[in-house]
Image: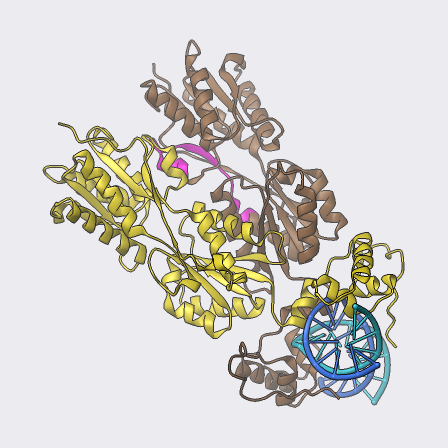
Chain colours: A brown, B yellow, C blue, D cyan
Amino acid sequence: MPKESKPDVPAAGVPTAKPTINDVARISGVSKKTVSRVINKSPLLGQATREKVEAVIAELGFVPNLQARALALRRNFLIGLIHDNPNAQMVLGVQEGILQTIRDTEFALVVRPVDRHSPRLLDDIRHFIEQQRLYGVLLLPPISENDELAALCRELGCTLVRMGSAELDDEAHLVASNDRQAVREAVAWLTGLGHKRIGFIAGPTGFRSAYEREQGFAEGLAEAGLTPDPALATRGDYKFESGYEAGQRLLDALPRPTAVFSSNDEMAAGLLHAARERGIDVPAQLSIIGFDDTAIAAHIWPPLTTVRWPIVPMAAAAAHKLIEPSDALSRQALFLSDLVRRASVAPPEA
Amino acid sequence: MPKESKPDVPAAGVPTAKPTINDVARISGVSKKTVSRVINKSPLLGQATREKVEAVIAELGFVPNLQARALALRRNFLIGLIHDNPNAQMVLGVQEGILQTIRDTEFALVVRPVDRHSPRLLDDIRHFIEQQRLYGVLLLPPISENDELAALCRELGCTLVRMGSAELDDEAHLVASNDRQAVREAVAWLTGLGHKRIGFIAGPTGFRSAYEREQGFAEGLAEAGLTPDPALATRGDYKFESGYEAGQRLLDALPRPTAVFSSNDEMAAGLLHAARERGIDVPAQLSIIGFDDTAIAAHIWPPLTTVRWPIVPMAAAAAHKLIEPSDALSRQALFLSDLVRRASVAPPEA
DNA sequence: TTGTATGCGTTATCAT
DNA sequence: ATGATAACGCATACAA
């Protein structure tokens, strides 16, 4: 005979025994199931009963035990965020976006930074997903481009949404920005100002984002009737130092480029650094455009013109796809980036 | 009569029915409880049985269901990180540190950005902790300074550790850096180089970190036998713009300060911006020291001398205090910051 | 519209 | 050293 009753006063030292559905049922004089119906907003329920139970719930400060719910429903309420730290601002923006969506739901956000170069990457993530029995995961670039990883998630019965700069997946499992077009527009702005010798710092090979930006650049040049000059194109690894080194090469070119598009802000900052060392005035003698709109962009001098992903809305949408896949809102997969025009760009010197 | 058996082949479409403790028990020919003992490494257990069961576990790829465990043990395995975005780099460093500790445990990290100015702050957090039934939480500055919030966590039976720049709590519930002393040393470096007119940009009132840095600055001056000059002290709100405005005031002072300590990097970047606009050469005519060593610090020009918190080790220690409070490692509460010397500081002009 | 019996996967109690 | 059985808190199937 199970005892359903509890002491009215919790024993001292015990971590505040919380009221359960049984307490609510007993006090309001109904069955557990009825309380359960109230919690789950079942439509077939007497108005009077509902209000009575709700009153008791409020009075007791009853909060349904998510673990018990998860057990009974055989599904958890955890959204996983798996990333390999693309940049801090992005990760934080993503977290904020996810939280906007899951606020006022039962879902929580659990994060998992990983090392994409670790040989145990897949095993680690498998263990993580299985152990926590995640409801769904959001993959950030660049590991969102890893198809093996995506297959793993699916194998584990864990829905996923990938964030990226190209069509990595179908629209139900993707939030993407149009990097290619955004770069094309950035280049169009430069050419519109009269720039003809435009340098390019590519991102690391193997990154889809790097590839897309590269294509966008080439297309942008083509649209303006310009021919790509191999001497004005170089490659970095998205880090500051590589941008600095890229700068050394580009600024050695003769004649020097009057503008440079860098595939991300950090490398752009490195380039700026190199230009400054040589006494090259930015933007008078050299215009610079970056990509990402990280915190650095607005805080260096001159402030950096850059392309900004709508990170927060994208992440919010991604979370929406995870927890409400059938909703109409969950169909948007493409999010437009915009060019943030700051002081690092000017017309070329006469 | 409960049926304990399962089909050998999972039904198609069903999200991969995972093996349970019952499966393991049945196949290895022991009781659930014995399997449970194996999982929990109970000492009183036959070696033969243990190995037999472990073999089956490995073969089946059995992973214990954390939700069920949480339910039975009446405690969850979630560590919460509650913060009001002090800065992206710090939050990410903290996440990395926590993860270092909980990797290879059953714990997971769930994050919760909040708005410290929201009137619903306490209610939101209460609901979050109750709903997720967090095992413990880590509070980041500045909300770690909120004693009401700390009391709330305790009331909810949720252990907490606070991160801060002063002794907010006893050593079991605190990881702190010695901001005051770090600033004192930074000032000592400046005075050692010969600076006598040193400006100060304080952080916002109400922040413990701001107060500590202020005190450290005053003490540093005193140690060098210098008298604080009210005209050289101003206050910002930790944002770039306020640093810029502070710069306007400080650089108007006559005679101009030869060095300025800013209570964080963002404001230092703003100050640098202001100096540049006036054609003041940094560091030749003006030395600048910041605080935090954010990504900005190393990427502006000149690279910023700054004070760096050992964020990752601090967070790792904090997580350790949460999940292994009795461990000896959990006793360290104070972590020393160090001065990162970069090009933004030079001796004053003759 | 509401209640009863049972299951979810694990641990705890108390046997043997 | 191992096992039978009852929790843990909630949801579902099926009655009533």
Q: Is residue A36 above or below residue B62?
A: below
Task: Report whether A108 appears left or right of A150.
Answer: left
Q: Quadrant of residue A19?
A: bottom right
Task: Report whether A183 appears left or right of B350.
Answer: right
Residue at (70, 45) in percent of width and height: A123
Q: Is residue B109 above or below residue B347?
A: below
Q: Position of residue A18 (x, y in %)?
A: 57, 78
Q: Position of residue A71 (x, y in %)?
A: 71, 68
Between B117 and B299, the residue placed more toward the observer is B299
Between A170 and A350, the residue placed more toward the observer is A170
Q: Is residue A201 above or below residue B39?
A: above
Quarter placement of the C terminus of chain B:
top left
User: What's drawn in magenta, residue-wise?
Assistant: A296-314
Residue at (75, 51) in percent of width and height: A156
A276 inside magenta stretch: no
Q: Is residue B157 above or below residue A91?
A: below
* Residue A196 in view in this figure: no
Task: Report whether B180 appears left or right of A180.
Answer: left
Quarter placement of the N terminus of chain B:
bottom right
Q: Position of residue A6 (x, y in %)?
A: 61, 87
